[in-house]
Image (spheres, helix red, strand yellow):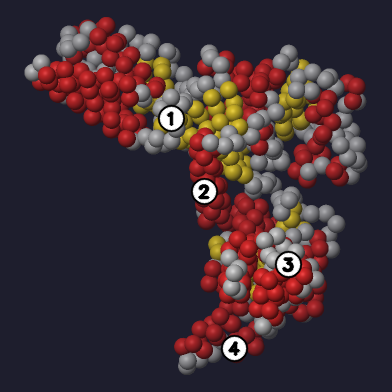
Amino acid sequence: MADVLSYRPRTGEIPTTPGVYRFSDESGRVLYVGKAKNLRARLANYFAPLTSLHERTRRMVTTASALEWTVVGTEVEALQLEWTWINEFDPPFNVKFKDDKSYPYLAVTLADEAPRALMTRTAGIRGARYFGPYPQVWAVQQTIELMLKAFPIRTCNNANYKRAMQSGKPCFASQIGRCFGPCSHRVSIEEHRARVDQFVSFMGSQDRKLINKLTSEMKEAAAEQNYEIAAKRRDQVLALTAILEKSAVVLRDTVDIDLFAIEQDELAAAVQMFIVRGGRVRGVRGWMLDKELDVSTGDLIDSVMQTAYTGAAVPPREIIVPELPDDAEAMETWLAGISHRKVRIVAAQRGEKAALLATATQNAKQALMLYKTRRSSDFVARSKALEDIQEALGMPAAPLRMECYDVSHLSGTNIVASMVVFEDGLPRKDDYRRFSIPESTDDTDSIYRTLMRRLAYLVPDDEAAESTHPVVSSESGQIQEKRKKFRYQPNLLIVDGGQPQVAAAARALADSGVTGIQLCGIAKRLEEIWLPDSDYPVILPRNSDALFLIQRIRDEAHRFAITHQRARRKKDISSVLNEIPGLGPARVKVLLQHFGSVARLKEASEESIAEVRGVGPQLAATIHEHLRA
């Protein structure tokens, strides 16, 4: 592969001004669209030596055959043009949003003669004021029901309203007490508009001042024995209080913010948007993003905010993000143009907003995990994933049984390995196994030792058949059943790691004499698939089900190994160190941080133990004596 791309422009030809660029292939299809404050500086990153590029970036620039750019006046214009081009060309290497539903909003049609409240998924209704988004339709309907008790306004559609106003007969919704517009002949156009203003004001701020005002009016009416007015005010207070109670209080009641949390891995990202008005979480929105290129958190935030505020949503004065994008000032200017007021983008570091960001991040983590689990559990997706793995690795048949191995340790001690099993693309947890490794030189040696122990059970079929005879003892039967499952040969053996780990696994396969098993490794940093004796990795498409499945089995092996390693470490600590007089949890922690493990602490001398902060000569002698004993 040539290290210099044929379509690379001369450095002096690239302007140093803000602009938007796009890579295209031979057919003219746009592969990637990006923006830059300085086009020359940004594009230089793509034309660095190919060996230094991220694997996904290298694949994009080598697939492309042309590069074009458009110079603009400001970063804000670059932001707008980038978003326009992404929507127009749908480039495969840009971030892919998976927002599988259009969220419902509560809208008030302020441009109408008699504004109405309605639930809608349609953005851009002329003159409408939007509230939301809401997670479910019923949440909007419930809010409308409660708000109508406090501020009875029109809910009927325009056709019914016009017919009622022309005929002088109330609409059907009004006849059954579901609409309280002017056609009901209970209020005038002006009185109805005043109610609408109160409706919008409360929905916009959810300020308790209105509740306090209505409560005072209720008490005054009751004191004057005007019980009908008092009852109406009471119902209004109860309705508004119910709305407030349905929203969790998270911040001061003067705070209006939108908060974005992002959790990502190499292939996908989950975004959670918390909409806080009046200190209360009024709505939650979520997206899943498929990533083809290695995208920074700042660039993701750019894309997310462009998606969030294209349509009905109006940004508040403050937006909380986990990390400021490089073009934060340009983004603020763009958002100010949408909301017609100043907007600040803030990275929360401490305090109540940072605590809320941590909560939103936990939701994003759960969403990412659920997304990957559901994608791997879908039958059609699993079948396609297994077929793609078969084709990518050149296997004679789909890998219906896969085993993945990972090694975990603490500074070279407490070494354990895990084996997880997936059949038909689903985990078989009853077939999982753990291995304790007494000593090892490095991870590759640990992989070799683990696989030699595992492969020893893969005996020929005739011997395996003899080993499956029933046993009278139930305990012996369970052991025999476990051994029987351990003799099942996998179609594909996966190790967590790159070329060195794959080479160690291949050596174990060769030394054990076991054949008929395909071997590969997955390198975590770039999600590359390595085969034995191969100088180049297999690159699966970034958003493919095949890569998701391999990534999931690798993550499961890592989880299983590290859980066992931590359990052993905890047992080791509690059973040994906690028995020593004068050694509390704080000193135990300091000792382990210093020595790395109890095993190394046992080998240490009194003098080296005494050098640890907080441990004097007397306690060091006690520790040394106790561990030696």
**Element class at badge 2:** helix
- Quarter of the image for the C terminus: give it: bottom right
For residue 252, which numbered disc appears in the image? 1
For residue 610, which numbered disc appears in the image? 3
- Observer-side mark, 3 or 1, equals 3
Number of residues whose C-alpha sits closer than 10 Å to that of mark 1, classed few (under 14), some (14–19) or many (20 or more): few
- Observer-side mark, 4 or 2, equals 2
- C-alpha separation, residue under disc 3 versus residue under disc 2: 45 Å
In this figure, what is the number of numbered marks? 4
- Observer-side mark, 4 or 1, equals 1
Callout 1, which amino acid?
Arg
Tell which residue pokes out farthest to the front in this image. 618
Residue 20 visible in the snapshot: yes
- The x, y position of residue 378, in whole percent, is 52, 54
The image shows residue 300, relative to residue 51, as above or below, that is: above
Task: Please give the name of the residue rendered at 42% of the width and 13% of the height, measured from the top-left corner.
Answer: 127
Number of residues whose C-alpha sits closer than 10 Å to that of mark 4, classed few (under 14), some (14–19) or many (20 or more): some
Residue 509 visible in the snapshot: no
Callout 2, which amino acid?
Gln
**Element class at badge 4:** loop
Number of residues whose C-alpha sits closer than 10 Å to that of mark 3, classed few (under 14), some (14–19) or many (20 or more): some
- Observer-side mark, 2 or 1, equals 1
* Horizontal relation, residue 46 to residue 379: left or right: right
Q: Which residue is mark 2?
A: 366
- The x, y position of residue 465, in whole percent, is 60, 86
Callout 3, which amino acid?
Ala
